[in-house]
Amino acid sequence: MVSQYFVAEDFNKKECDMRLSLLFVIGIFITGCSSQPVNKSFAINTIEESELGYIETKKIDKFVVKNAQQLKQFNKVILFATQFDKLTLSEAANKKMANSWSDSTWKEMDAICQQLDDFAQKIFREGGEFVPVKQGGDDVLAIQFTLVNFMPYSERYKDAGMDTVGAQSNNAGVGLVTVRGILANAKSGELVAVLEETLEVNARTATMGNLAGVYDSNNKAAQTLAWRRTFRRFLGDLHKELMTLKYAQIAQHP
């Protein structure tokens, strides 16, 4: 009887261990599957008399590609410093506001670009794929952003008289900025894609959860926050789109 008890107990223990092991394996499988992006389908729309095509994405205004299939080979990125040498002010801008931003120094504009560069490193590093590296390779995508156009909705904080601590509500935000991104093979230099996105520069602060109450202030801290939050949203959206395109089924539109 004693030996039968231990045999039965040993059998029950083994059966229990097998069930736990099976549950553990199933758990790993489910977790692994859920971490992969959902495969989607994209059509490359042809551009007349051009070797380029464009893809309609949910989060990026314009996404033009030379070889969309190349996006699947990249696992890392080199992020070059953002440029603003081609930046123009919108012809429709208020003259007073345009003059204010025209007086921006190189140091002031470089500080704005640095916000984009800092968040690019952070978001791509934490994204799990397209991790930033310092050297090129077959699996490295080179990205460089350029600020190309700005439509100001307010003056710089210096000209608004708010300096660093003043507060003045501005429902329109800082303005609209268009960012262009050039994506290339880091090893060969071959063009992969060009993107453009026009961004509303605002901090999206709100009172009591009322989005209609979104406003920005014209002091230095508020305008810096507006640029930071705007670039963070843009880069988060871009990383998601690159992940989606990497695992998507891409077909050439007839």
Image (cartoon, helix red, strand yellow):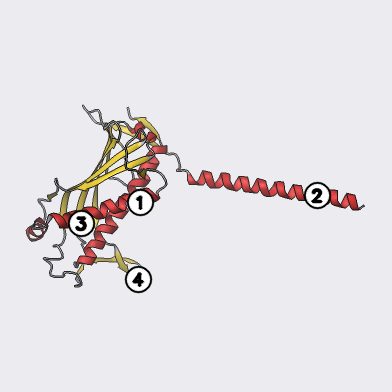
In the rendered structure, are the residues bearing label 1 and label 3 in contact, judged by CB atoms less than 8 Å apart? no
Q: Residues within 10 Å of mark 2 (few under 14, many from 20)?
A: few
In the rendered structure, are the residues bearing label 1 and label 2 in contact, judged by CB atoms less than 8 Å apart? no
Q: Is residue 79 above or below residue 118?
A: above
Question: Which residue corresponds to mark 4?
Answer: 208
In primary-sequence order, the first of circles 1 and 3 is 3
Q: Is residue 24 above or below residue 153?
A: above
Distance from Cα at disc 3 to Cα at disc 4: 32 Å
Q: Secondary structure at mark 1?
A: helix
In primary-sequence order, the first of circles 3 and 4 is 3
Question: Which residue corresponds to mark 2?
Answer: 10
Residue 169 at x, y percent in the picture? 21, 69
In the rendered structure, are the residues bearing label 3 and label 4 in contact, judged by CB atoms less than 8 Å apart? no
Distance from Cα at disc 1 to Cα at disc 2: 51 Å
In primary-sequence order, the first of circles 2 and 3 is 2
Question: Which residue corresponds to mark 3?
Answer: 111
Question: Which residue corresponds to mark 1?
Answer: 123
Q: Amino acid at mark 2?
A: Asp
In primary-sequence order, the first of circles 1 and 2 is 2
Asked whether residue 52 is in view, the answer is yes
- The quadrant the C terminus occupies is top left
In primary-sequence order, the first of circles 4 and 2 is 2
Q: Residue at x 7, y 61 (%)?
A: 96
Distance from Cα at disc 2 to Cα at disc 3: 69 Å
Residue 43 at x, y percent in the picture? 35, 34
Distance from Cα at disc 4 to Cα at disc 2: 61 Å
Residue 25 shown left or right of residue 184 in the figure: right
Q: Secondary structure at mark 2?
A: helix
Q: Residues within 10 Å of mark 1 (few under 14, many from 20)?
A: some
Distance from Cα at disc 1 to Cα at disc 3: 19 Å
Distance from Cα at disc 4 to Cα at disc 1: 28 Å
